[in-house]
Amino acid sequence: MSKSCWFFVYAFMFSFLALMMGVALDSDETAPADIGCTKYFVEFDGLTYDQIQYKDIVSLTMLKNYDLIRQGKQEGLEFDEYYNGPANYKDIGKCHAYIYLTHPDYVLLTTGQQKIVFNLPSLEQTEQLYSTIRHEMEKRN
């Protein structure tokens, strides 16, 4: 092939790669997780997806000013202000984490099969979500 053909091949490949990187970085998978409550369950939609029914929650704990200490290699995605995905923390163990790194206040939700650590962008929002989940749990007991 001539040099001009190679030039077009490389230009096409570079453009395609740049486009794919842009799509990947703009993906919902790299955005903070969406956490929501319905009448029947709490939903965590991020790098991993969890849907926990209130009746399956064994414990719900507010961790205020808590120092999450990592153990080993983390498998999720960490950006400047949040972490999303499988994690392993000292005193908690293996869990799914949907956390903003903007403040040290978290909620630990435990079921019979898993643990989930999460928070929202502010302490006030995190406390409100904790109260909502606690209220829904109490309605079922």
Image: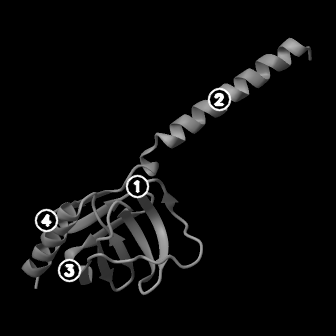
Residue that carries the numbered disc 4 in the rendered image: 39
Calculate the distance from the C-alpha at mark 3 to the C-alpha at mark 2. Answer: 48 Å
Within 10 Å of the Cα at label 3, are there few (<14), some (14-19), or many (20+) other Cα atoms? some
Viewer-nearest of labels 4 and 2? 2
Q: Please report whichever mark, 4 or 2, sits nearer to the chain's N-terminal start.
A: 2
Q: CA distance from mark 4 to mark 2?
A: 44 Å
Q: Amino acid at mark 2?
A: Phe
Q: Secondary structure at mark 4?
A: loop
Along the line of sight, the residue nearer the viewer: 111 or 130:
130
Going from N to C along the chain, the mark reached first, 1 or 3, is 3
- Decide which of tag 4 and tag 3 comes sooner along the chain: 4
The amino acid sitting under disc 4 is Lys
Give the residue at mark 2.
16
Q: Mark 3: which secondary structure?
A: helix
Residue 125 occupies which quadrant of the picture? bottom left
Tell me which label, 2 or 1, sits earlier in the chain: 2
Callout in the foreground (4, 1): 1
CA gap between label 1 and label 3 equals 32 Å
Which residue is painted at 46% across and 64% down in the image?
Answer: 85
- What quarter of the picture does the N terminus occupy? top right
Residue 55 is labelled as: 3
Which one is earlier in the sequence, the residue at label 3 or at label 2?
2
The residue that label 1 is drawn on is 81
Q: Disc 2 and disc 1: Cα gap in Å?
A: 29 Å
Work out whether residue 79 or residue 130 is closer to the camera in this orientation and state it: 79
Where residue 22 sits in the image (x, y, percent)? 54, 35
In this figure, which colouring scheme has been used for the structure?
A: one colour
Residue at (77, 17) in percent of width and height: 8
Neighbour tally class for label 2: few under 14, some 14-19, many 20 plus, Cα within 10 Å: few
Q: Residue furthest left?
A: 139
